[in-house]
Each structure stands twice: as structure tokens, then as C-alpha cells.
Image: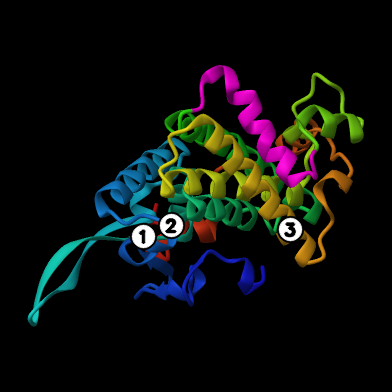
Amino acid sequence: MAKKDLITIGSKSFEDQKKINEYGAEYWSAREIQPLLGYTQWRRFEDAIKRALISCKQSGNEPSYHFAGVGKMIDIGKGGSREVTDYHLSRFACYLIAQNGDPRKPEIANAQKYFAIQARRQEITDVIAADIERLELRKQTAEEFKALSGAARDAGVHDRMFGVFHDAGYKGMYGGLGRDAIKKQKIIPEKENLMDRMDTTELAANQFRMTQTRDKLAKEKVKDQQTAIRTHESVGKEVREAIKRIGGTLPEQLPPAEHIKQVEKRVKSTAPKLKLEEKDAKGLSGKLEEE
């Protein structure tokens, strides 16, 4: 996978943070990848680590091979320092942490896509890799839709007006077409969910629209229903203009993608077990225990 596809913060990427221990095994410091995954509070990040530990055990893998508790010295100013809790993590541990993190965080969302593809890159075709990316993105847009609905409610949108509010975003981004008009133009059956027929590019654009609207409503402290609706439409128009500027295909011109349920079925039919290959199962130890 190209470097530009890795999760990054500033000039640092996940792969840049990799270290090699005395056993020749690669590992990452939890404290160092914490900001990469969008966590500002160690307490909340450690909660994700603990959930990942449980997942590791439930998957039939030995947690001690992948999570090692260690101390880390940090500066506290005026020349002082103190020791804080840290973990050395295998690549598999990092994958589990991403899977158990907050999917509303863009960093976690990107990490989930990255690890989902990386974990299976060597055993699946590029078609399945693309399927996995689309599935992950569809899950994230579903979460973002819920989060945006919550933000709309906080901004003064009444429940009965949620349809109008969400349609405003579509109209801004799709050149005046609301959800039903988009489905009609793309010849998508009325009963189908529009986002279930979006490809990865279209899903990503809509996810961006929703996250930016949610952030704008909060930043501008919108508390009026009509203002919230106009804000959503305005953000949709900005996303549309951005697509135009970079020469992308306008969303209403994109053909409908294969239904997401078919994609999910195909991925499940080739789903690997969580049993790791010997090299990966060794994790931080670099070797398995002698029998």
C-alpha cells in the first residue's frame, strides 16, 4: 500500500512509528500511536486497548504475545520527568485497537479501513480489497448519519423535519436533487437505501458532507431549525464545488453501484479466520513458547 494511504498525523504515519524489539519483532508504542487514532485523552484510549485485549483473547490468540505493559518516561517541565503506563503493541494489536475504537473519529475510521485491507491483502484479490473498503465506508456513513441527526436535533431541528434537513444536504451536493429525485435519476428502486447503492467515491463524498455539516453546526452554535437546514444545504454546495474544482464526476452522474448486501455476501464467502499465521501469532515475542 502506498505511503499516502497510511493513517497520518502531520508528517508522521503509522508505519513511521514502527520499532523493532530485542527479539526482532516489530512493535508500536501505544502512547505514540494514540494521536494517530484521534485520541487526546489516554484514559479513553486505554479503554479501547482493554476492549482490544478482550477481542484478542476471544479470537483464540494469546494477548501476552501482542500487548505488553511497559513504563514510559515523559517530560513534565522544568527538567522533571515521570513514568506513565504504556504498551508495546504488535501489528495485530493495533488492528484490534482500531476495530474497538470510536468509529466517529475520522482517524479511527481511516485506521479501520487501512487495517481491514492490510490484514487480508496477501490472501485476497484486489476486488475483495475494494469490497472491504466500501463495506467499512458504508458502516462509517451509517454512524455519521446517526451522529449528524443528533447534531441536527441539538441545532433545533424537530424530528418531523429530519427528512427535510437530510434532503437539504443532498440538494446542495447533487445540484438541487433530493434523495427521491437522485434515486429516480439513477433508476434505484424506491424501497432501497440510496447509500446502499453508492460506490466508495460517492460514499466518501457524502461522509465528508455530513462530518463537515456536523462540525459547522457545532462551531457556529446553530440553534434554529431553518438555519440548520440552510447550513446543511450550503455545505453540500461547497462539497459539490470542490468536486468540480478537482475535475471529479458530479455525484448525480455516478452510476448506481452493486447493492451493498451483495458486496457483504461476497466478502463473507471469503472471510478469513482470526487464527493468525505462525509469524504473526508470535507477535512481540518473536517466537512461540516451546511445547
Q: Main secondary structure of the magenta part?
A: helix
Secondary structure beneath disc 1? loop
- Measured Cα–Cα span from mark 3 to mark 1: 34 Å
Please state which amino acid type lies under the numbered disc 2.
Leu
Q: What residue does disc 1 label?
A: 34
- Measured Cα–Cα span from mark 3 to mark 2: 29 Å
Q: Is residue 158 above or below residue 290?
A: above
Q: Is the N terminus in the top left, top right, bottom left or bottom right quadrant?
A: bottom right
Label 1: few (<14), some (14–19) or many (≥20) C-alpha neighbours in 10 Å: some
Q: From the top left corner, tell me how far across and down residue 67 is, in percent.
A: 34, 54
Snapshot quadrant of residue 135: top right
Label 2: few (<14), some (14–19) or many (≥20) C-alpha neighbours in 10 Å: many
Label 3: few (<14), some (14–19) or many (≥20) C-alpha neighbours in 10 Å: some
Residues marked 2 and 1 touching at CB (< 8 Å): yes
Snapshot quadrant of residue 84: bottom left
Please give left or right for residue 104 compared with residue 35 in the image: right
Q: What residue does disc 2 label?
A: 37
Q: Residue at x 49, y 51 (%)?
A: 108
Which numbered disc covers residue 190?
none
Please state which amino acid type lies under the numbered disc 3.
Glu
Please state which amino acid type lies under the numbered disc 1.
Gln
Seen from the viewer's position, the closer of residues 287 and 232 is 232
Seen from the viewer's position, the closer of residues 251 and 75 is 251
Residue range in magenta is 157-176
Q: From the top left corner, tell me how far across and down residue 91 is, in percent.
A: 48, 60
Q: Residue at x 18, y 72 (%)?
A: 74
- Foreground label between 3 and 2: 3
Q: Is residue 42 above or below residue 151?
A: below
Secondary structure beneath disc 3? helix
Please give left or right for residue 163 compared with residue 87 in the image: right
Q: What residue does disc 3 label?
A: 241
